[in-house]
Image (cartoon, grey):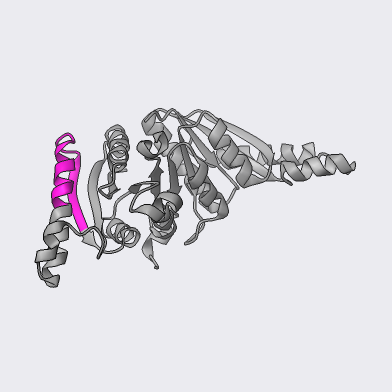
Amino acid sequence: MKSFLVGLDGSPQERSVLAQARDLAERLSATLILFRAVPLPVELPANALGVSPLALGDLLVDSARQHLAELARTLPPGLVAKERVDLGSPWRAICEAASAERVDLVVIGSHGYGGLDRLLGTTAGKVVNHADRSVLVVRSLLTDGS
Amino acid sequence: MTLGRILVPSDFTQQSAEALRYALELARSLDAEIDLLHVVPAPSRVIAAVDAYLGRPLPHVREEVLAAARVRLARFLGTMNRRGVTVHARVTSGDPAAMICEHAVEGPDDLIVMGTHGWHLGSLACRLLGVAPCPVVTVRLPENRAQPQF
């Protein structure tokens, strides 16, 4: 196994998901692709109200990209192969990015991406259903502990 | 995350063979052991309790059936390259999804590796994702990689 795509979502649980992905990748000498899907039109930052609708997508993607870059800085050099941000619904974006990057494994948390998913875990369930490769669903420790 | 023990539920299908192959490779890299579990389908404990109460013949699964399943599991395992990996093969009976979930929750395993059947998860995978206290890997058959459908 050479590369993992890690689905991150900006939630408090994502660090636990990333830590577990890092742990496994280090043991298997794999590299990580940090991925974040930007769904529209939720998660609008305050400065989004002042931009034209056409620029909104870019603004959100940039903000997500900065977020991934910050996370990547917390990891040892060489572990992160790349960071990738796509617009779209998270489960679909993760499945498409996993195929496009031809990763060996998708790593996602069992919760995240908003209130309903917290109960149902629908993003994780849909990715497992629809991804054309193997998926590792990890427990988000923060969720379990609270 | 400690990964000393990996649970692989098996129903002898191509999907579970792929999952076992994957788990063996993983176990070799991580120096982990594998718990290979096959559940002979049988009525759930509730039904068994009702049958016992009503004086119907028990047990539902005869010892010969379990013995045959043990032989089949050993043969299934024999087709794999298990070099360097300790595999604990075990056969039990009951409602497969419930037994596997129970094993996942109460057993010593740190990771579950299971096959998936095509584009929609079986009830087992759905239930496991909901209850498993440890991470779960769902393994996709390689030939499906060629044609993703949404």
Q: Nearer the viewer, residue A122 or B111?
A: A122
What residue lies at 42% left-to-right and 51% top-to-bottom?
A: A121
* Number of numbered discs on residues: 0
- Comparing B130 with B78, the one in front is B130
As for residue A68 lying within the magenta part, the answer is yes
- Is residue A33 placed above or below B88 in the rendered structure? below
- Residue B121 left/right relative to A138: right
Residue at left 29%, top 42%? Answer: A12
Q: Can residue B75 be spotted in the picture?
A: no
Residue at (34%, 53%) from the top-left corner? Answer: A114
The residue lying furthest to the right in this view is: B55
Q: Position of residue A99 (x, y in %)?
A: 30, 59
> Would you say B52 lies left or right of B30 here?
right
Part of the protein shown in magenta? A65-85
Q: Position of residue B56 (x, y in %)?
A: 88, 44
**Residue A110 against residue B6 in the figure, above or below:** below
Of residues A58 and A2, the one drawn nearer to the viewer in this rendering: A58
Left or right: B49 as drawn, with respect to B136: right
Q: Residue at x 38, y 60 (%)?
A: B145
| Front position in the image: B88 or A63 | A63
Above or below: residue B96 compared with residue A61: above
Q: Quadrant of the N terminus of chain B?
A: top left
Q: Position of residue A140 (x, y in %)?
A: 37, 40
Residue A59 visible, this angle: yes
Query: Looking at the figure, which quarter contains the C terminus of chain B?
Result: bottom left
Q: Is residue B95 left or right of residue A50?
A: right
Residue B53 located within the stretch drawn in magenta:
no
**Picture coordinates of residue B57, whole percent (x, y):** 88, 42
